[in-house]
Image (cartoon, rainbow, N blue to C red):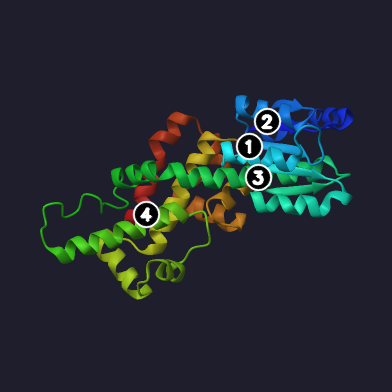
């Protein structure tokens, strides 16, 4: 991910630039000495994250954040704030900043905040981009096959049932990264949880938990294959806060730990990933 730094104090800019950003998979795409320069760089470089001072000449941090988030709502803005700017920093939340870091600070605190921002970006991107891919993967490997079921069936009850299941699956695919359950799903779509459970089993052959787990583990395997994000962050990004539990479930499905799975070459992964998953689901 790309990071833009904005601070009018040269020593602070140099200090921020000297940090080992590559260690957390960050590329610094620019460093600006005022809000106007930062805005120009943001429009040109389209950073994922902006780490900005609040008090800067020409355009201050609030003005910068407002313009950037208007241009690119997916960008994450983090403020660097002195103690005297505390109330000012809090005002930034009203326009959508992610967080603020109080000066003076340490590299560890900065990295921690930026990594949390990265995790949020990852979750949002997964939510926006995974639906089509996930549907194709699940359908292709018969985890669920509700999208082509009963196409020629003219019975209105069956059509209504399929529509409900489609809504349920879409909701799970869009929210697998959160703490969802049959109860939260029931409240969301205003249907009894027992009815939902029976409907899923009847139409897909699988339970709510089996479908949710399959989606989470498929996405986790994809992240292990395509990114260098650490296993703890991957666990959280697919909605499982307990890394130990995540590793146990992953190993049960793929017959290997997440770490070992990551070390496989892409050919082996591509060949084995869904065969293993389908075998587990059939079991």
Instruction: Name which of mark 1 and mark 2 comes first in the sequence.
Output: 2
Find numbered disc 2 in the image and state the secondary structure of the residue it sits on: helix
Residue 208, placed above or below residue 76: below
Q: Is residue 64 visible?
A: yes
Q: Which residue is at a point 60% across and 47% down the rendered structure image?
A: 120
Residue 178, placed above or below residue 217: below
The answer to the question of whether label 1 and label 2 lie on touching residues, with beta carbons closer than 8 A, is: yes
Instruction: Name which of mark 3 and mark 2 comes first in the sequence.
Output: 2
Instruction: Name which of mark 3 and mark 1 comes first in the sequence.
Output: 1
- Camera-nearest label, 3 or 2: 2
The answer to the question of whether label 4 and label 2 lie on touching residues, with beta carbons closer than 8 A, is: no
Q: Residues within 10 Å of mark 3 (few under 14, many from 20)?
A: many
- Residue lying farthest to the front in this orientation: 58
Give the x, y percent position of residue 76. 64, 42
> Residue 170: which numbered mark, if any?
4
Find numbered disc 3 in the image and state the secondary structure of the residue it sits on: helix
Cα separation, mark 4 vs mark 1, equals 31 Å
Find numbered disc 4 in the image and state the secondary structure of the residue it sits on: helix
Instruction: Name which of mark 4 and mark 2 comes first in the sequence.
Output: 2
Q: Residues within 10 Å of mark 4 (few under 14, many from 20)?
A: some
Residue under label 3: 117
Cα separation, mark 4 vs mark 2, equals 37 Å
Give the x, y percent position of residue 64. 70, 37
Residue under label 1: 68
Q: Is residue 35 left or right of residue 183?
A: right
Residue under label 2: 39
């Amino acid at each position: 991910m790309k990071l833009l730094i904005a601070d009018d104090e040269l020593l602070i800019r140099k200090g921020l630039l000297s940090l080992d950003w590559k260690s957390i998979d960050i590329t610094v795409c620019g460093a600006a000495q005022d809000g106007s320069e930062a805005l120009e760089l943001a429009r040109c470089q389209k950073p994922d994250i902006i780490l900005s001072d609040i008090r800067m000449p020409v355009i201050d941090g609030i003005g910068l954040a407002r313009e950037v988030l208007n241009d690119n709502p997916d960008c994450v803005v983090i403020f660097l704030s002195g103690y005297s700017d505390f109330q000012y920093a809090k005002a930034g939340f009203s326009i959508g900043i992610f967080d603020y870091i109080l000066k003076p600070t340490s590299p560890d605190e900065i990295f921690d905040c930026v990594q949390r921002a990265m995790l949020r970006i990852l979750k949002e991107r997964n939510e926006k981009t995974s639906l089509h891919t996930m549907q194709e993967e699940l359908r292709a490997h018969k985890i669920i096959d509700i999208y082509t079921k009963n196409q020629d069936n003219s019975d209105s009850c069956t059509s209504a049932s399929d529509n409900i299941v489609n809504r349920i699956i879409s909701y799970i695919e869009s929210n697998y990264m959160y703490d969802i359950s049959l109860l939260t799903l029931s409240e969301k779509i205003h249907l009894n949880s027992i009815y939902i459970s029976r409907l899923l089993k009847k139409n897909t052959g699988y339970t709510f938990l089996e479908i949710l787990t399959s989606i989470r583990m498929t996405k986790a395997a994809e992240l292990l294959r395509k990114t260098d994000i650490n296993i703890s962050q991957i666990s959280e990004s697919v909605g499982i806060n307990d890394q130990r539990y995540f590793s146990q479930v992953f190993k049960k499905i793929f017959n290997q730990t997440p770490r070992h799975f990551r070390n496989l070459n892409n050919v082996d992964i591509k060949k084995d990933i869904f065969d293993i998953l389908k075998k587990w689901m059939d079991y």
